[in-house]
Amino acid sequence: MKTNFYNTPKSQTMIWNPNKECMSRDEMSELQGRRLHKIVDYVYHHVPFYRNKLQSMDLTPDDIRTIDDITKLPFTTKQDLRDNYPFGLQAAPQSEIIRIHASSGTTGNPTIVGYTRKDIGIWNECMARSLTAYGVGRDDIFSVSYGYGLFTGGLGAHNGVETIGAAVVPASTGNTEKHAKLIRDLGITGIACTPSYALYLAETMEKMGITKEQTRLRIGAFGAEPWTEQMRTEIQERLGLKGYNLYGLSEIMGPSVSYECVCQHGSHINEDHFYPEIINPQTLERLPDGETGELVFTTLTKEGMPVLRYRTRDLCSILPGQCSCGRTSVRMGRIAGRSDDMLIIRGINVFPSQVESVVLSSPEFAPRYMLIVDRVNNLDTLLVQVELRQEVFTSTFDTPTAINKLEQHLAAKLKSVLSIGAKVQIKAPNTIERSQGKSAHVIDKRQM
Ligand code: DLL
């Protein structure tokens, strides 16, 4: 018999695995220490890359006894993964690998990640923890609109929905009109997709005349790209659901390395499997909780391709204190950007997420924007293109003065946040390219 989780009050939301998600801090540290020793011993004996690294630092697995010993270990970078393409970092024998994913590398070789049966089981468990934290239960019908294929989003979320026993609709991306129709006709209650696809879906439904009242949507599992609180508000209002953050990366597992709970104050890390650290990306020193730096993960239980101190290049902080949901696991804040996404314009660090916050704080603009960086006469220039909302477009587009005023107003706001001047260009609705997967917000012509 399926239990009914609809409209479950906050205090009664379920926890998938209280034994792990609500462990005392001492027990968690003890478990992490034990697992760290084991994984170091495992890679030392199965991955020549790590054995050589540890030997060159005069380290053996016996030097790693508690979780605090982690700082003795070397870092792993994306370049190390590329250099060992395709299977150089694989620890398990090929006969134990049951699935292979590949990351979407834009330059050079993609990163190949092999999973054993045990890895897939842990991934499913982590995904089930995430969905349960959002309030998804067995009565839900959940559509997965992350891409299926080499990308971890589709299959990762799909298996999590099946693990908790809800019904999965493997919609994938594309064919959005059909998907919108199914959302209404099947009474789909939840959706997993990128935040930008959620907005695209909202637009499509509006065009088709499907209102949020005609659907039963109530939960969104959004991730795979940075998004802001303003974007969350926009999606929630337009789709009539509550949107939760879902974070992960293929090198570590895929979606569900961390997840939000109903408190929506940071994302709980599945730290019995993925040990987080925040470091200063320049000095590589570990930073205390609350400080923003580069997120680093060590996989504590992975068999296929374990990694030690993998530098994600994602910038965020570990939130101090404990969450009121009952979980004791540490939480990470939103991804403020990636160290390699950061633009340096006239010497000033600029993150696309800063521009997004400013754009979305103005009710006239749709959540679509593009940063175009160029170099003219040896001087960096920044052009920010934004799209007018349909309602505003029809009432003001005939008056260039109004548009001009709006451009100047936004340029002034951007200047106060970014500390550099930007030219603003307002575009008509639906003219900035839509993305169904991860969206691109930057064209840097200086590198072309
Ligand atoms: O994006 C895995 C995933 C799929 C996560 C579906 C969530 C949902 P990769 O393609 O390897 O894996 O990209 C990982 O995407 O290092 C972040 O920069 C970014 N990212 C992922 N989730 C979030 C999020 C998947 N919730 C890279 N917020 C990561 C911000 C995110 N950025």
Image (tube, rainbow, N blue to C red):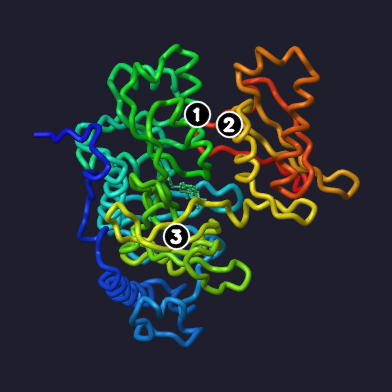
Indicate which label's residue lies in the foreground, 3 or 2: 3
SS of the residue at dot 3? strand
What's the CA distance linking mark 1 and mark 3? 28 Å
For mark 1, does the 10 Å Cα neighbourhood hold few (<14), some (14 to 19), or many (20 or more) residues?
many
Alpha-carbon distance for marks 2 and 1?
8 Å
**Badge 2 element:** strand
Q: Quadrant of residue 357?
A: top right
Judge the density around disc 3: few (<14), some (14-19), many (≥20) Cα neighbours within 10 Å. many
- Mark 2 lies within 8 Å of ligand 1 (Cβ measured): no
Task: Report the residue at 37% width, 57% height from top.
Answer: 269
Q: Is residue 243 left or right of residue 353?
A: left
Mark 2 in CB contact with mark 1 (< 8 angstroms):
yes
Q: In the rendered image, which residue does mark 1 sit on?
A: 199
Instruction: Please name the residue shown 69% across and 50% down the image.
Output: 350
Q: Position of residue 187 (x, y in %)?
A: 28, 22
The residue at the far left in this view is: 1
Q: Is residue 376 above or below residue 306?
A: above
Q: Going by the image, does 196 lie left or right of 323?
A: right
Which of the marked residues, 2 or 1, is nearer the chain's N terminus?
1
Q: Are marks 1 and 3 in contact (CB under 8 Å)?
A: no
Q: Which mark is residue 367?
A: 2
- Residue topped by disc 3: 319
Residue type at mark 3 is Leu
Q: Amino acid at mark 2?
A: Pro
Q: Residues within 10 Å of mark 2 (few under 14, many from 20)?
A: many
Does residue 340 sit above or below 205 in this rendering?
below
